[in-house]
Amino acid sequence: MQSLLLCAALLLAESLAFPVQHKREALSTMGLEDVKAYLDAFFPFYTKPKSLSLEERIKEMQRFFHLTITGRLDEETEAILRQPRCGIPDTGDNRLFSRNPWGKTHLTYKIGSYATDLPRPQVDDAISRALKIWSDVTPLQFQRVLNGHADIEIKFARREHGDRYPFDGRGRVLAHAFSPGEGIGGDAHFDDDERWSESNKELSLFLVAAHEFGHSLGLGHSNVRGALMYPTYTRMNPATFRLPEDDKQRIQKLYGKFS
């Protein structure tokens, strides 16, 4: 009898413990290769020793985002990894980005191709307002051109689109832009697989474009939460958006204040 009671107690304990264990295992559904791919894309080696362990690389990412430094893929860290974001690396030692400003304040832009799901007038308006965010606080002036070369060339594209930095379909990388310079320097590309909107119902083209144009003007990412140049997409009301102080100070350091 005692033996039967002991067996029953053990079975009951196991049945109660199983769901808790299952829940712990379900906290992370990202594979190891997914984590490595994220770190390779946004926290690349370049000037760091390639002998860094995965734990050290996760810690670097956690430090940038002001997370608890664990070196593990905990819930907080995985949440960041899953957020839609800009395709530019977050570390300062990346080859995509020079952080050098334009040597002039009058810049031209051209929209070479449009979003599939957003009417052209809405795209034109979002792009114009996104550039105005930066010209309102600096001496910068932006002039649209319809033909020929432009300092900032804008296009919507899917997957591989000619710059060796293919998009990945809906989600994760929304857009990318290149720092000032020759060739594709200053250009901004948007993933046409995303659901762009004029407001914030899906993805606000205005907010993402304003972020990307920060790169086109020479700004890298900011790790200040709430900054426009924070790497991940944050829902904000485009109608009431004002450039945060962190972004304002950084762009004025490059180009001076509006006079």
Image (tube, grey):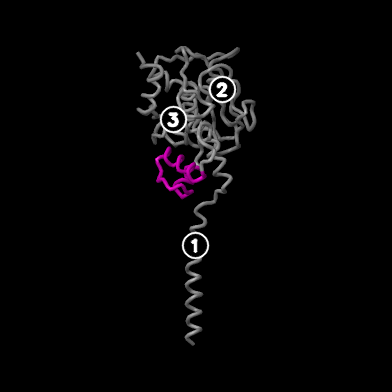
Residue under pointer 1: 21
Question: Eyeballing the image, is 160 above or below 3?
Answer: above
Residue at image position (56%, 47%) is 32
Residue 154 is tagged as 2
Q: Nearer the viewer, mark 2 or mark 1?
A: 1
Residue range in magenta is: 53-81
Q: Main secondary structure of the magenta part?
A: helix
Residue under pointer 3: 229
Is residue 58 within the magenta segment? yes
Count neighbours of disc 3 (C-alpha within 10 A) and say few if under 14, some if 14 to 19, many if 20 or more. many
Q: Nearer the viewer, mark 3 or mark 2?
A: 3
Residue at image position (49%, 62%) is 21
Most distant residue in the bottom direction: 1
Secondary structure category for the residue under label 1: helix
Count neighbours of disc 2 (C-alpha within 10 A) and say few if under 14, some if 14 to 19, many if 20 or more. many
Q: Which of disc 1 and disc 2 is earlier in sequence? A: 1
State the image quarter where residue 190 is shown.
top right
